[in-house]
Image (cartoon, grey):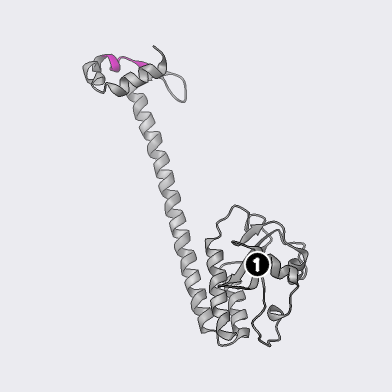
Amino acid sequence: MKSDEVAQFLQENPKFSEEYADLLSSIYVPHPHDGRAIPIGERQLITLREKNRMLETKLRELLKFGEENDSISEKMHRLTLALLRARSLEALAYVLESSLRDDFEVPHVAFRVWGMGVGVDLPEFSEVSDSVIEIADSLVQPYCGLHIASELLSWFGDSDHLKSFSLVPIRNELTIGLLVLASEDSQRFAPDIGTLYLKRLGEEVAAALTRFA
């Protein structure tokens, strides 16, 4: 019989282990790590311990992710309240940048808003090129990666030290702006990170801005 046939037989005949318990107790198999022969029962215990360790590791990871999500959710809540309390566009711009810098530890923040018909003497509300608007409109979801357009880099002044970026469209039904986050850490906004909270951030900023349109 081949190995898979033996395995199938044992699966289809669960009473075999009861009828031949003495036989099974006398079977020795290689240890999974050091190669010495051990009883099949001990081998099963080792397998169960390893599975238990794997489950414990996954549980710790889930708890860690849960704690991180709770922390982010709390920060997002504080930012939302701060945006709602802002009484002017100047205050809103300050709240957004300071919250991202101090609460979320994003060292470099820049954004531009257009099409709102407001006369505010701030860089954030200055005119942008058509290419910037096209970039923002093309984003189905926030972008994270190592490269962005040179015009966006110019928003940060000296940008040689910036290694990773996130582009967040400021959008409700229409795209009215673009938020750019940057870091000296190349892994901070790596392409494989999740973007759910970034998308929500863009939506919250858009909702706060439309109060002043």
Residue 185 x %, y % = 66, 58
Residue 105 point in image, percent of width and height: 59, 67
Q: Can you tell which quarter of the image residue 66 is in?
A: bottom left
Which quarter of the image is occupied by the N terminus? top left
Task: Give coordinates of residue 10: x percent, y percent.
Answer: 31, 20
For the residue carrying disc 1, how many other residues have a C-alpha within 10 Å: few (<14), some (14-19), or many (20+)?
A: some
Left or right placement of residue 67 versus residue 89 in this view: left
Describe the element under mark 1 as helix, strand or loop: helix
- The residue at 67%/55% (across/down) is 186
Q: Which residues are magenta?
A: 23-28
Residue at 69% of width from left, 65% of height from top? Answer: 135
Depth check: 144 or 139 in front? 139
Q: Nearer the viewer, residue 171 or 30?
A: 171
Name the residue located 42 percent from the left edge and 40 percent from the top edge.
54
| Residue tagged 1 | 137
Left or right, 78 with reference to 156: left
Residue that extends furthest to the left in the rendered view of this protein: 19
Residue 133 place in picture, x, y as percent:
70, 70
